[in-house]
Amino acid sequence: MKKPKMTCKEFDEGLREATKKHRGIENDAEIRPFVCDGSPLECSVFIVGFNPASAIPFWDYWNSKLCCFDYKKWEKAYTARKPLSPTRRNINKFSGVLRKKEVQCLETNIYSYSSPTVKSLAPELQTTHTFEFLIEAINPTAILFHGKKASILGELLKQQKGFSFGSQSCRHFSRGWSYVAVEKLADDFFTDMCVCKRS
């Protein structure tokens, strides 16, 4: 039986509670729970990495009343600091292919705090409260894990928590991808995972 969709208020309260669990800080400026273009509740696909590489504030672009994330403004702030990375360009390409098929994507990470490298992420920040909340709240149809570490940890959590989403893995989006290859990946993912517009 399909779980009823959360209200905007319930999602916002749950998100704030989940993000606070990491360090006990309300509206933690250093955390990036997710990014998406619009409402996370409309997303049936997650794109999941290990942790964010950049610390662009999340809450400045989150509208709690509308339950909406302003991706365009967030990306503008991102590019004001540095050019789009290969990872960001490839994620945008993947999401764009699915959007044309009326499927909305949410981008998130196993760990919600940024660090320059995987190894430099402090052990105390390697907690999955936010990722688990997003799975439980949104109940995605399918997840694409990009990168070996994200794939291993994500599949382990799936088994431990009994999550029911379909999943695939690919190499990290940071290197070795052409736009043609990303487009094919998205097309194959759409077919293999039987994803559709969130109703």
Image (tube, grey):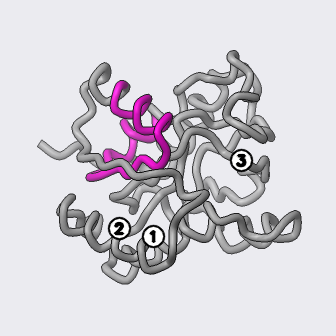
Frontmost residue, 86 versus 144: 86
Rendered position, 28 above or below 9: above
Please tell me in which quadrant of the rendered image residue 191 appears: bottom left
What residue does disc 2 label? 185
Rendered position, 190 above or below 21: below
The answer to whether the residue labelled 2 contacts the one labelled 1, judged by CB atoms less than 8 Å apart, is yes
Amino acid at the residue labelled 2: Leu
In the picture, the quarter occupied by the N terminus is: top left
Frontmost residue, 154 versus 38: 154
Q: Secondary structure at mark 1?
A: helix
Going 73% across and 65% down the picture, which residue do you hit?
Answer: 74
Q: Would you call the spot at circle 3 few (<14 residues within 10 Å), some (14-19), or many (20 or more)?
A: some
Q: Nearer the viewer, mark 2 or mark 1?
A: 2
What residue does disc 1 label? 94
Residue 53 - label: 3
Instruction: Assign the magenta stretch its main secondary structure.
Output: helix
Amino acid at the residue labelled 1: Phe
Going 40% across and 52% down the picture, which residue do you hit?
Answer: 170
Name the outermost residue toward the bottom: 100
Residue 5: percent from left, percent from top: 32, 50
Which region is colored magenta? 133-156
Rendered position, 28 above or below 74: above
Name the outermost residue toward the top: 124
Q: CA distance from mark 3 to mark 2?
A: 23 Å
Q: Earlier in the sequence, mark 3 or mark 1?
A: 3
